[in-house]
Amino acid sequence: MTNLPRKDLFEMPEGLIYLDGNSLGPLPKSVPAKLAQVVNDEWGQHLIRGWNVDDWMGQPVSIADRMGHLIGAAPGTCVLGDTLSLKVHQALSAALVLRPGRKTVLSDTGNFPTDLYMAQGLIRQLDQGHELKTVAPEEVADHITEDVAVVMLTHVDYRTGRMHDMAAITERAHAAGAVMIWDLAHSAGAVPVDLEGCRAEFAVGCTYKYINAGPGSPAFIYVRPDVSGEVFPALSGWLGHEAPFAFDPDYRPGPGIERFRVGTPPVLQVAALDAALDAWDGVEMEDIRRASVALCEQFIAEVEARVPALTLASPRDASQRGSQVSFHFEHGYAAMQALIARNVIGDFRAPDIMRFGFTPLYLGPEDVTGAVDILAKVMDGKLWDRPEYHARSRVT
Ligand SMILES: *Cc1c(COP(=O)(O)O)cnc(C)c1O
């Protein structure tokens, strides 16, 4: 049993209730010292020797292995690098090559825009008659037909928290001969995931949300080991080459997951991830899930009892929901600004969604009650209806 929460492992401003760890995780206390050590001792003293003596070059795989238990990935099946948008491109371009005769990429209308945008851009560039088809999340399974090349889905919907049945959909995709890509942006560190068990060919995700590796931290890509050797990467960068330091003018893909590397790894961000993973040592995802469901259920019950103006946008059934709860409210943007001004941080997603992430590593039941107290006060007194709360910032 994991003892939760582990609040002492995180930096948190006094009096703040942070319900936005699904968008940017807080700072683990282990990170500043680790960054100082890598900057001062490794970069400062070792300089270019760090690539070898500090294993900077091996870390995109070795540190990815450290997070494997969070997503059910075996050692050597994931690599870190770039941003999630680029990893979506890598996975989709590789998947399409595996099904040359098929033209449909199936996704759902709740998918995160960048995933759809990357698919649109790739299809346009390939110019081979592919089509991106999006259907309602509930209808995805029924549209997995024999003309579908790739099923590309985000496991947990960023807006509503609705969660797909990963095992069932992957099985359905494979039965129809399609390749499966899962985006785990709102799953890694949030809900148990069993990549090996579900046999999906590809999965991608980021490390700055529930894993708490900080703004700009690297994304990851998982490729099923029997598939990784079969694809010729579209982003054929030198560090994915079989022998980068042979400086051969012709590209030859590296072994297995190594070919999904592109260029120079973000060493400082990988170090931050390494330190952030200390907070996950000995943590069982089943324990995280149990605590997360309890926090979400408590939040829904308290909001519905005390704040009738908000209507639930997330699935009511906990088994269909990730680790976030969303509510509709017509003036959701202003209401969220009023909450943030009172030290309760969640976020807003257009058109009218107030979104709250629940992260049992550093949140307990007292935080849920504290947040609802303030939410009730803001709503009862219509405190959100002030001009300064209606002005939209660049990032919402
Ligand atoms: C957060 C998120 C992204 C972000 O992509 P970046 O390239 O890291 O900016 C992409 N897809 C999904 C599903 C997300 O939730």
Image (cartoon, rainbow, N blue to C red):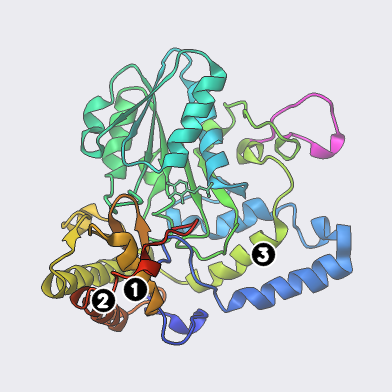
* Some atom of ligand 1 lies within 8 Å of the CB belonging to the residue at label 1: no
Can you identify the residue that label 3 sits on? 271
The stretch of residues the image draws in magenta is: 241-255
For marks 2 and 3, the one nearer the N-term is 3
The quadrant of the image that shows the N terminus is bottom left
Residue 121 vs 377, above or below: the answer is above
For mark 1, does the 10 Å Cα neighbourhood hold few (<14), some (14 to 19), or many (20 or more) residues? Answer: many
Query: On residue 153, which mark appears?
Result: none
Residue 281 visible, this orientation: no
Asked if marks 3 and 1 touch (Cβ < 8 Å), the reply is no
Can you identify the residue that label 1 sits on? 339
Distance of label 3 from label 1 (alpha carbons): 33 Å
Which mark lies nearer to you, 2 or 3?
2
Q: Is residue 125 left or right of residue 196?
A: right
Going by the numbered disc 2, the residue's amino acid type is: Val
Going by the numbered disc 3, the residue's amino acid type is: Ala
**Majority secondary structure of the magenta segment?**
loop
Asked if marks 1 and 2 touch (Cβ < 8 Å), the reply is yes
In the rendered image, which quarter is residue 189 located in? bottom left
Going by the numbered disc 1, the residue's amino acid type is: Leu
Distance of label 1 from label 2 (alpha carbons): 7 Å
| Mark 1 secondary-structure assignment | helix
The answer to whether residue 254 is magenta is yes
| Mark 2 secondary-structure assignment | helix
Residue at the spot 38% in from the left edge and 62% down from the top edge: 347
Can you identify the residue that label 2 sits on? 378
